[in-house]
Structures are given as C-alpha cells and as structure tokens.
Image (spheres, coloured by chain):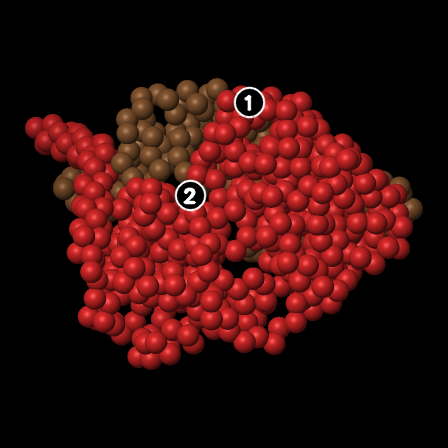
C-alpha cells in the first residue's frame, strides 16, 4: 500500500512538474496580457500626456541609465551628465554600461521586468520592445518641451514607428567608410582609388609589397558584412542590404551577384591578408596607423579615434566598387537613420520623468560629441569647441550633404534578425575564402529566399 | 541497505528528497520547459505561438546541422583520443616509475585546467594568428616559407580549436585516472611479477581492466563534452568562418541571441540532450562487459 502511495505521489509530482512546464504558454500569455496592459498604459499615458505639463512632473532622487560608456563615449556621456546636472542638480544618474551591441541584455531584462528607466537600444530590439509595450511614447513630451525647435529640421529623421517616436537619437549619417594610410599608399605609388579597377590594382600592389591591403577586424562580423554592403551599393543597388530587409530588392538581383564576385576577386588577390578572423578592432587600428596595412573599413566615428594620428589618414570619397567610368559614385553604406536610439521604459516608476530625461540626455550627449570630436552639429545653438578636426574629417563633414544614398548597418540595423544573421555568416565565409561567390548567392537564396 | 532505512522508508524518502527536489527543479523542470517551448515560435519576450514540429523541421533541413554534427564528432573523438590517451600514459608513468619531481609534473599537467577558458582561448588565438602567430613566426624564423591561417581555414579551424581544448582539459582526466591507478591493489602487481609479467603485460592485463569504470566515465565526459562544446569555439572563431567550426551549442546560441528565435533554440537544445543521453547509454552498455571486479 505504501509503495502504491509512493508511486502515485511521484507520478503526481511528475505531472505537476510537466504541467508547470506546459503552463509556460499561459505564463507567456499572462505576460502578454500585462504587455498588452502596458501597451494600453502607454497609449493611455499618451492620451494623458496630451497637454502635458512638464513642470508638474516630479523629479526623482535617482534614475537608472543603460548606455554605452566606454572608449570615446565616456567623454560624451560625462558631458551629457554635466548638462543634465545643470537642469536637475539633485538628480543622481546611475550609469549601467551597455556591454553588448545586439540588445540581448536589454531584451532579457525586459523579459524579467527589470528594464532600466532610460536605455539605449538598437533597431531590432526597439521593434521587439515596441511590440511588448515596454517603450514609452515620447511624442507628447517632445511636443511639450518644444524639443525639435532646438535642432535643425532633419536631425531626427527616421525615428518613428508608424508615426510614433519610441526611441530617439540625433540622425547624423555615420557612414561606413574606407580609410587609408596616406604614407603607405604614397610609398607604393598608389593614388586614392576612385573605382573598382583602381582599388583592385591597389590591393594587388600592397599584397605584393608584403603589406596587408585591407585591415579587417574580423573578430567582429559587421565590418566584413558592411564592406559587402558597400560593394552592393557600388554595383548600383543603392538600397544595399537594407533593400533585402525592406523588400525593395532580392538577393537574386544582379548587383548582389556582381558585388559578391568583386569581393571574391579581391579576397583572392589577398585583400585581408592572414589572420583577419582573429584580428580585433584595436589590432586593425594599429596595423593601419603603423603603416602595416593600406586600407581599413570602419564607421565614420573612426575619424574621432584616429584624431591623434594627424592628417595621415585619408578616406575614399568615392565608392571603390563602382565600375570604371562611374568614378563619381558617392553612394555610401551605413549611417541611414534607424529607429533605434535612447528610450524610456513604459513599465518603470518614473515614466514621465524618464521621457524628459531621455530627451535632455540626447541633446547633452550630442553636444558633448561635437565638443570632444567635432563632426556635424545638429543643435541650432552650437556649443563652443576647441577640437581640431583632421583634414579628412573636415572633408567628410563637408561631403555629407553630397551622399547620394545611405543604407543601414546590416549587422544591427535590419529588422529581420534572421536575414542579418545569415548575411553575417555567409559574408564572413566569402571574406575568408571558404566559399565562392556562386555558392554564397546560392546559400543565401536557400536561407532567405 | 542501511538498517535505519530498512526500518523506516520515510527516513529514506526524507534524506533523498532534497536531492530529488533540486534535480527536479534545476534539471527536469527546465528540460520539460525547453521541450514544450521547442514547439513554439517565440522571440524570448512576446507571445509564443504554437508551431508544431516547425522548429525541428527547420533544424533537420538546416545546412548547418551536418557541419555542426561533423564538428561535434571530430571534437568528441579528438578530445577522447588526446585527453584519455595522454592522461592514461602520463598517469601510468607517474604511478609506475620512480622519477624525481612527480608532484611537479602532476601540477604542470594540471595547471591549464585552472586557467579560465577565455585566457586559454586568447593564448591559443595568439599562437594560431595568421599574421603574428607563434607557429607561423617560428616557421618563418626557421626559414620555412610556410604560413597557415589556422583559424580562418574551413578545414583546419576545428582541429586547431579542439587541440587547444584538449590541452586545457587533459590534466583533469589525468588526475582522475592517476587516482584510479593508485587504487589498484599492489598485490596484483606483486603476484604477476612473480609469474614473470612485464610492465607492459601488467598495464594491459591488470591496470587497464581494473580502471575501466574510471576510463568509461572519462570517455563519456569527453564524448558528451564534444557535443556540448561552446566557450572555446565561440571565443576563438565564433563558429566561423561562416559556419565552418560551428557545433550544436553554437547553433543554439545563434538561434537564441542572433536569430532571436527562442523556440528554435530550445529545439536544438532538446536534440542535444537526446544525443548526449543516447551516447551515454551506448558507451555504458558497450563497455559493461569490460569491467572487472577488484
């Protein structure tokens, strides 16, 4: 009898355990319900915010801010905090460093209901958090603060989802740029390439000279992927890889094949040298700055990183994948406005204040970025700076208005995470020479259709 | 059975309960949850939708699966051969020879086990680096016009990684096998010596059969680890180039954190668990007849 009781008890325990596991859907549904509620709250909040009296919003003692706080960004964030301190002197800002680029930490925190009051998030996560109702609507606070009047007209282009702003940042085009070491090119008799043929010849010349033609920091997947995006743009598909995400183009289009073929030919000519997969950003910078590599690809923020190196770093003004005869192709890769940026948690205790805080932080950080690293300033009241921009950076800033198109950073700017993951993996294989352009396209067709 | 438990099975249940409960909470429940979620489409945050066997279909038709399985098998075999092989040889030498500095050698072999995976991975990345790596530099200084891009190669990458992993973990198995060899009663060796057995005969006829249970455990650990390998691969190549050095755990990580498909990631984890259980059972059953009672 005792054995039977024991057996029954164990069976019941097992069934309860299974039901507990199976009830996850219910649990998810519950969280969805609460998400829906919070969405509803957010929209209610929007309604309530109509005619928002920002002076009536209570200033809390402290606020949690999840933000990238390393490298050059430390100065920008510190500047923003000083700016914030002038507005709210008694406010303590608790900084939490954003250690990942893909928003995984943020999404995990959202899943367990522990979002910081204010945070920085990428496009894909922005969409997920928007869907779950975790993002506060910023429109009414923007209006109540007359926020846009402090900036030029296009400073916040592309920041809304269905006409509503959930995350905000100044939309400065930080294009993916091919930099070069002027001394290395001059010593090898190479002039700044303006089309694909010249770029190919430069790669061959540098490889034969025992140098690394293009310092790729392949320990991260995005630089290689963005170079392919630049190639697609140079081959005539101005939507680049973003076009695959938005549906305006298909991987079977000629530009994607041509770009892959050009990249394959460059790789065979020794584009990346050896060890690119194990090379990190700092190592690539050193290769470039010490004259062991001719070219390097990075976002235009590298102008700030290489400021100490004077005028020896130049950048390719024209797309190096354009065919001969199309030398004036200024179509760029990366830097198009994206919906990501700084957001306020809709589920926190200080939602209204967090919305205001986010807006002021963005203004302060942008001012700090301009003060410490130059570049285009979108504030109408431009702060004073004694930062001296390099020749190349000045030229880049002047050329920004001539960019004929820009695309997203495909590794984190695309909404379709599956697409960006497959693109990352297969472009890496193409770059390391473990697949050819025909297989590359065929594999992508299989994966993304 | 302990007489206390013979008298009162309640006592037995009470004593076993904490472990059983912990096991259920930490192992059974998450496994059940993963199994259930593997039938859903879920981004980890919003509503999960039931999709039947779609995730399994996606997994079994995935181009990456065959590469992951091949790499896992390579990883398992290489780990087993290197770690168990060297561990057994070193243990035998340390137990049966009178050399000076036994403790020193034991410590040296065990030292890599104490290092964190990230440290070891970075160390070996520096050794393998195609441009500045130790191996290529040594080859160059010796006048060989031979340079390999170890980690960027589709064929060599996984072997380069598993060599680093094997180097790191060998000492752990060596200590286990060393302890097992030390537990073999000396009277067997004395008797066999009188009968004229050589050290080689003693090793194959006495030592090896008596440490089979220990070896079996080590083999199971090595082989199942091959199917669970993640950290070293992730740090050294991220599963690349492309998916050339990927394994099931890397696929699972990508599914969870890159694709943002938690349901798909759970399906991969369920398959991993099933594979590990099958391997464990096969090894256990196939080696049962080799075990000898002391």
Measured Cα–Cα span from mark 1 to mark 2: 22 Å
Instruction: Provide residue A91's location: percent of width, then percent of height.
Output: 31, 75
Taking the spot 31% from the left edge, 32% from the top edge, the residue there is B37
In the rendered structure, the answer to whether residue A395 lies left or right of residue A337 reads right
Vertical placement of A91 versus A222: above or below?
below
Q: Are marks 1 and 2 on the same chain?
A: yes
Instruction: Provide residue A434's location: percent of width, then percent of height.
Output: 69, 31
Taking the spot 78% from the left edge, 52% from the top edge, the residue there is A293
* Colour of the chain lettered B: brown
Query: Given the image, what chain letter belongs to the residue carrying mark 1?
Result: A
* Colour of the chain lettered A: red
What residue occupies the far left of the structure in this picture?
A1
Vertical placement of A182 versus B198: above or below?
below
Looking at the rendered structure, which numbered label has been put on residue A124? Answer: 2
In which image quadrant can residue A90 be found?
Answer: bottom left
Instruction: Provide residue A437's location: percent of width, then percent of height.
Output: 68, 26
Query: Given the image, what chain letter belongs to the residue carrying mark 2?
Result: A
Q: Residues within 10 Å of mark 1 (few under 14, many from 20)?
A: few
Q: Which residue is mark 1?
A: A445
Q: Secondary structure at mark 1?
A: helix
């Amino acid at each position: 009898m005792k054995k039977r009781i024991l057996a029954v008890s164990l069976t019941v325990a097992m069934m309860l355990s299974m039901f507990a596991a199976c009830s996850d859907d219910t649990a998810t549904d519950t969280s969805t319900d609460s998400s829906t509620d919070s969405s509803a709250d957010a929209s209610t909040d929007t309604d309530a915010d109509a005619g928002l009296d920002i002076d009536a919003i209570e200033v809390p003692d402290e606020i949690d801010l999840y933000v990238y706080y390393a490298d050059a960004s430390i100065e920008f964030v510190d500047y923003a905090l000083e700016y914030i301190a002038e507005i709210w002197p008694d406010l303590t800002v608790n900084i939490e460093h954003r250690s990942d680029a893909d928003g995984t930490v943020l999404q995990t925190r959202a899943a367990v209901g522990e979002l910081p009051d204010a945070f920085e998030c990428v496009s894909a996560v922005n969409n997920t958090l928007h869907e779950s109702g975790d993002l506060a609507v910023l429109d009414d606070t923007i209006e109540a603060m007359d926020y846009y009047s402090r900036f030029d007209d296009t400073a916040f282009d592309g920041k809304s989802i269905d006409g509503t702003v959930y995350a905000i940042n100044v939309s400065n085009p930080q294009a993916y740029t091919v930099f070069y070491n002027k001394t290395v090119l001059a010593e090898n008799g190479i002039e700044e390439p303006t089309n694909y043929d010249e770029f190919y010849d430069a790669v061959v010349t540098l490889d034969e000279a025992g140098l690394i033609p293009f310092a790729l920091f392949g320990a991260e997947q995005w630089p290689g992927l963005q170079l392919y995006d630049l190639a697609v743009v140079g081959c005539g598909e101005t939507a680049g890889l973003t076009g695959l995400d938005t549906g305006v183009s298909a991987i079977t289009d000629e530009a994607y094949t041509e770009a892959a073929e050009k990249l394959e030919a460059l790789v065979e000519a020794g584009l990346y040298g050896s060890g690119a997969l194990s090379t990190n950003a700092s190592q690539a910078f050193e290769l470039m700055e010490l004259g062991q590599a001719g070219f390097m690809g990075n976002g235009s923020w590298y102008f700030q990183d290489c400021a100490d190196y004077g005028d020896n770093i130049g950048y390719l003004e024209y797309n190096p994948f354009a065919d001969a005869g199309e030398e004036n192709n200024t179509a760029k890769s990366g830097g198009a406005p994206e919906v990501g940026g700084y957001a306020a948690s809709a589920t926190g205790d200080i939602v209204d204040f967090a919305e205001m805080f986010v807006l002021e932080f963005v203004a302060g950080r942008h001012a700090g970025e301009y003060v410490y690293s130059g570049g285009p300033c979108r504030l109408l009241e431009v702060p004073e700076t004694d930062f001296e921009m390099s020749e190349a950076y000045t030229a880049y800033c002047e050329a920004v208005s001539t960019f004929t198109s820009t695309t997203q950073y495909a590794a984190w700017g695309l909404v379709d995470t599956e697409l960006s993951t497959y693109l990352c993996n297969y472009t890496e294989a193409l770059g390391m020479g473990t697949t050819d352009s025909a297989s590359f396209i065929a594999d992508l067709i299989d994966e993304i259709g | 059975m302990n007489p206390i438990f013979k008298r009162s099975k309640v006592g037995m249940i009470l004593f076993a309960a904490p472990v059983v409960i912990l096991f259920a909470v930490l192992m059974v429940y998450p496994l059940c949850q993963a199994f259930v979620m593997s039938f859903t489409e879920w981004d980890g945050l919003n509503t999960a939708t039931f999709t039947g066997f779609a995730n399994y279909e996606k997994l079994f038709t995935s181009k990456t699966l065959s590469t992951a399985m091949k790499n896992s098998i390579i990883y398992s075999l290489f780990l087993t051969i290197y770690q168990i092989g060297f561990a057994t040889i070193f243990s035998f030498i340390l137990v049966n020879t009178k050399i000076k500095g036994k403790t020193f050698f034991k410590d040296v072999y065990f030292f890599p086990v104490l290092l964190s995976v990230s440290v070891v991975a970075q160390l070996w990345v520096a050794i393998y680096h195609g441009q500045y790596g130790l191996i290529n530099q040594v080859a160059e200084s010796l006048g060989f016009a031979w340079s390999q891009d170890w980690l960027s190669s589709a064929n060599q990458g996984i072997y380069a990684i598993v060599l680093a992993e094997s180097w790191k973990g060998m000492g752990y198995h060596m200590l286990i096998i060393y302890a097992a060899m030390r537990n073999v009663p000396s009277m067997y060796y004395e008797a066999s010596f009188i009968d004229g057995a050589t050290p080689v005969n003693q090793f194959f006829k006495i030592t090896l059969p008596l440490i089979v249970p220990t070896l079996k455990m080590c083999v199971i650990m090595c082989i199942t680890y091959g199917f669970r390998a993640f950290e070293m691969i992730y740090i050294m190549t991220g599963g690349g180039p492309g998916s050339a050095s990927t394994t099931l755990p890397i696929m699972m990580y990508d599914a969870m954190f890159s694709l943002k498909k938690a349901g798909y990631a759970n399906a991969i984890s369920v398959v991993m668990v099933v594979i590990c259980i099958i391997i464990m059972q096969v090894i256990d059953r196939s080696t049962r007849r080799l075990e000898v009672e002391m």
